[in-house]
Amino acid sequence: MTDTNVNIIKLTAAEIAGKIAAGELTAVEVTEAHLARIEAVDEKVHAFLHVDREGALAQARAVDAKREAGEKLGPLAGVPLALKDIFTTEGVPTTVGSKILEGWIPPYDATLTKRLKAADVVILGKTNMDEFAMGSSTENSAYGPTGNPWDLTKIPGGSGGGSSAALASFQSPLAIGTDTGGSIRQPAAVTGTVGVKPTYGAVSRFGMVAFSSSLDQGGPCARTVLDAALLHEVIAGHDPLDSTSIDAPVPPVVEAARNGSVAGMRVGVVKQFRGEGYQAGVIQRFDESVELLKELGAEIVELDCPSFDLALSAYYLIAPSECSSNLARFDGLRYGLRTGDDGTRSAEDVTALTREAGFGAEVKRRVMLGTYALSSGYYDAYYGSAQKVRTLITRDFEKAFEQVDVIVSPTTPTTAFAIGERADDPMAMYLADLCTIPTNLAGNAAMSLPCGLAPEDNLPVGLQIIAPALKDDRLYKVGAAVEAAFVEKWGHPLIEEAPSL
């Protein structure tokens, strides 16, 4: 790559937008620099499933034309973005990481996709993911795993590992992920990036292929807290096409990110978010982050949330049950893959053969588990009981937020593990989401941001910040303060110690 391209790809999204607006860079130059980076490194990383080169350049030329015409540009106009392949994009393949939708070209845009285009964000392409967002490592993609740019033998998190890897390898300054049990925050943690799960219902799910409808939430991914806030503001807001969309103003997240402070805030530390199974280096960096919050003027409050110990069990009954229902639409009859339709087989046989060929092992596992949990005679014992636990978790959060403004914890119990290490042990894989799942069950807002490298393996560690529903601005206020203090004290772990590919 040329020196100019290297300089461009190291800029933040806010810096890129500022330079385009000022005429110091064109959107085409910025897009070409990132496309060149993708061409140079993505064969090794495998962050993208589809790169829309012509579409991205066309969007970039339209931004440049607006600027030349004297039109006012939005705060992210001309900034490239990597879009998780779970959002429909008109004219561009959407596979959800599954063979069952291989080659499917949606005839419409998801609401989130429309909002990105309306804001003149340049969509580079679609990123790799665990099939139907089911996984914690992006190893469950039907199209092969993604590597972690810090160490290509390690996982980049999941299910949105493609989006996080695109950020960490400087293939894109912005990305979109979805978070059902931690799939934005967990990839952010293990790649040294920033990921935000907004309040449930704050970002439209229309056009987002459903996994677990009461848990799924799209959100912003970036390399800085401010960049995440700028993207959050673009994609959030009420959508009448989504029945779960919240009709409420978007919290002032950008203002909060520009004025980060924790002075006088009460910050909770939950005792259930540490103990057996947590890597020593992760706990060390978390404890240092708590001390940093104290130095910045926060009051630390110890919290006891006993129901959090049951969150993993409840999640892995609720999510598979909802996935069993949602994935029933993939029957080989309406769209996507169709197998065995030779004129001699019944519709039921074609559906069975299509699902056998089109769904991967993890999807089949969850569909079977969910179907069993919802079956007659077991509904109350399993799914019904899990929903009761969900209520207890929500109540524990409500009690906690009576005492504190935000809660902090490690984002993940460990740093990135090796590709293949947990492939044959689903329970070990599920434990990667131990700290993130309670937030999805309650519908609160949460963020992961880098808090250093674990001393034993020199891999990124994430700090999770959790805020009450509709108080997403608190994430950015605290996150920006921590980020600024961290950079001043130790340097940014990604920008200063960027992995070389």
Image (spheres, rainbow, N blue to C red):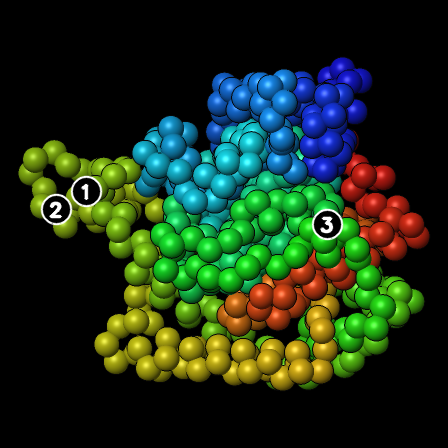
Label 1 packing within 10 angstroms: few (<14), some (14-19), many (20+) = some
Percent position (x, y) of residue 81? 59, 35
Seen at 30% across and 60% down, the residue is: 325
The mark closer to the camera, 3 or 1, is 3
Res 298 → quadrant:
bottom right
Label 2 to label 1, Cα distance in Å?
8 Å
Seen at 46% across and 67% down, the residue is: 316
The mark closer to the camera, 2 or 3, is 3
The amino acid sitting under disc 2 is: Ala
Q: Mark 1 — residue?
A: 333
Res 474 → quadrant:
bottom right
Of the two numbered discs 2 and 1 on the same chain, state the one appearing first in sequence: 1
98 to 297, vertically: above or below: above
Seen at 57% across and 33% down, the residue is: 121
The amino acid sitting under disc 1 is: Leu
Q: Mark 2 — residue?
A: 347
Percent position (x, y) of residue 240? 38, 54
Percent position (x, y) of residue 365? 38, 58
Residue 42 got which mark?
Answer: none
Label 2 packing within 10 angstroms: few (<14), some (14-19), many (20+) = some
Q: Mark 3 — residue?
A: 225
Circle 3: element type: helix
Whether residue 201 is visible, yes or no, is yes
